[in-house]
């Protein structure tokens, strides 16, 4: 069976690959090599395999080259999209910064207006009290004049009756001579003048009382307008600050109590303000003024508290937000990263005391600032530090320059906020203050 199969296979191969002989001739001899059909088939099959492998390998290389080109093009497009997105975010950030600056200017303007209105309100209150006192004096004078008028009228009536009846003058025993007539004429003349003076004084007092009453009503209307403006200004100024502290997870009442306790006994702007009536009951205007003054005191406390919490941006120049707070690669990224040119100025985000200024593993050149309310901020990877340990800084003071020190892949600022030693998202404070500062 195997012999017949071999013979049949040989016959088929011999049909397509007939036996050939390859002659090799030299000067003295001639030889040949016989190429059997099987040998030719193996050589042909081997050559075909080599050619097929070459074609397949070439196709694979071409496909890889084309695919790599597509990938590079896609990567280039993705990079362009990413850069376009970064540019739009940078423009949006600049617009936000401009809006924040405009809001700060509006806030300062509102404070100035409130201060002017407060001065006008205090002056109006003093003027109103002076008018009330003047009206009381005029009323007392008017009552005295009316009393004197009645006395003079009674004396005049007695004298006139004595003259008509020919009897003695009041206070005399009797008899009428020239001396008595002269005395009577003098008394009548004096009485008439006194009566005219009393009437004129009464009319003047009534006119003055009406004028003062009109001025008092005008003053009350002006005070009411000032009160309304102040109340609206307080609402516009205090409500955003309430929302800002609540958005940052800080209880406004607790914060204000801490600020007030920190300044107690020192006098100055945190002294309680109120109108007094020297033991009497407060009027509605006084109560209204006290409510406004309390709101102004609350606004002043908010201003102090806001300067002590990290609501400001650590960078004032252009930057790119490159990484946020949260877990990445299995580890907590405890802050936010802002990329910018090497040497970009870095500023303190709140009032505080520098507790570290130097090198720290991983952070590179690092500045730590301790603030009120148990808050600490960190500024890492600096190229240069401009403060020293123990130095007191204010919000907006330059503390260093952006760099690439420590465990860093490029020039940027790593900014952290810690409350009670625990890292929190610093963007909470920056977003909370974007509509206020």
Image (tube, helix red, strand yellow):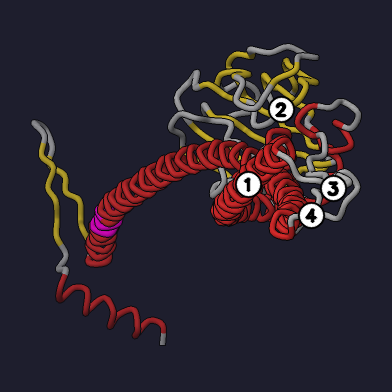
Instruction: Kindly identify which residue carries mark 3.
Output: 174
Mark number for residue 167?
4
Residue 400 located left or right of residue 5: right
* Residue drawn at (60%, 13%) of the image: 384
**Along the polypeptide, which appears first: circle 4 or circle 1?**
4
Q: Is residue 20 left or right of residue 402?
A: left
**Closer-to-camera residue (389/56):** 389
Q: Earlier in the sequence, mark 1 or mark 3?
A: 3
Label 2–label 3 contact, CB within 8 A? no
Q: Position of residue 272 (x, y in %)?
A: 82, 39
Q: Where residue 235 sits: x, y (%)? A: 62, 55
Inter-mark Cα distance, 1 to 3: 24 Å
Q: Is residue 300 above or below residue 174?
A: above
- Element marked by disc 4: loop
The residue that appears at 82% across and 34% down in the rendered structure is: 271
Mark nearer the N terminus (2 vs 3): 3
Residue at figure coordinates x 57%, y 55% from the top left:
210
Disc 1 vs disc 2: which is toward the camera? 1
Per the image, the residue denoted by label 1 is 192
Give me the C-alpha separation between circle 4 and circle 1.
21 Å
Range of residues picked out in magenta: 53-62
The CA distance from mark 1 to mark 2 is 80 Å
Marks 2/4 in contact by CB < 8 Å: the verdict is no
Q: Nearer the viewer, residue 237 or 16?
A: 237
* Marks 1 and 2, the one that precedes in the sequence: 1
Residue drawn at x 85%, y 47% is 174
Front-lying residue, 29 or 195: 195
- Asked if one can make out residue 334 in the rendered structure from this viewpoint, the answer is no
Residue 394, labelled with which disc?
none
Residue under pointer 2: 351
Do the CB atoms of the residues marked 4 and 3 lie less than 8 Å apart?
A: yes
Q: Nearer the viewer, mark 4 or mark 1?
A: 4
């Amino acid at each position: 069976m195997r012999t017949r199969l071999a013979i049949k296979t040989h016959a088929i191969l011999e049909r397509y690959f007939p036996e050939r002989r390859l002659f090799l001739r030299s000067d003295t001899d001639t030889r040949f090599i016989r190429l059997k059909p099987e040998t030719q088939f193996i050589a042909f099959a081997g050559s075909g395999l080599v050619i097929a492998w070459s074609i397949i390998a070439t196709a694979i290389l071409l496909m890889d080259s084309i695919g790599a080109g597509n990938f590079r093009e896609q990567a280039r497009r993705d990079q362009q999209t990413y850069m376009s997105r970064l540019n739009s975010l940078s423009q949006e950030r600049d617009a936000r910064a401009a809006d924040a600056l405009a809001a700060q200017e509006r806030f300062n303007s509102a404070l100035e207006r409130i201060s002017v209105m407060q001065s006008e309100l205090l002056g109006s209150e003093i003027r109103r009290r002076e008018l009330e006192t003047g009206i009381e004096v005029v009323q007392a004078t008017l009552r005295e004049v009316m009393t004197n008028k009645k006395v003079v009228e009674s004396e005049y009536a007695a004298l006139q009756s004595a003259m008509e009846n020919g009897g003695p003058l009041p206070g005399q025993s009797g008899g009428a001579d020239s001396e008595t007539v002269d005395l009577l004429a003098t008394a009548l003349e004096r009485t008439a003048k006194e009566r005219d003076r009393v009437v004129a004084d009464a009319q003047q007092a009534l006119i003055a009382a009406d004028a003062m009453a009109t001025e008092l009503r005008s003053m009350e209307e002006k005070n009411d307008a000032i009160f309304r403006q102040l109340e609206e200004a307080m609402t516009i100024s205090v409500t955003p600050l309430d929302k800002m502290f609540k958005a940052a997870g800080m209880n406004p009442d607790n914060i204000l109590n801490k600020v007030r306790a920190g300044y107690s006994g020192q006098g100055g702007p945190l002294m309680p303000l109120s109108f007094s009536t020297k033991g009497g009951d407060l009027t509605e205007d006084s109560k209204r003024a006290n409510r406004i003054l309390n709101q102004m005191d609350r606004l002043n406390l908010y201003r102090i508290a806001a300067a002590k919490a990290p609501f400001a941006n650590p960078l004032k120049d252009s930057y790119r937000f490159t990484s946020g707070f949260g877990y990445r690669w299995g580890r907590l990224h405890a802050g936010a990263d802002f990329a910018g040119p090497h040497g970009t100025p870095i500023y303190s985000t709140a009032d505080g005391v520098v507790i570290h200024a130097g090198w720290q593993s991983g952070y590179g050149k690092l500045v730590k600032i301790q603030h009120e309310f148990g808050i600490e901020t960190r500024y890492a990877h600096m190229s240069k530090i401009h403060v020293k340990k123990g130095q007191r800084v204010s919000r907006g003071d330059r503390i260093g320059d952006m760099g690439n020190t420590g465990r860093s892949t490029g020039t940027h600022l790593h900014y952290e906020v810690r409350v009670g030693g625990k890292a929190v998202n610093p963007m909470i404070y920056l977003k909370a203050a974007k509509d206020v500062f």
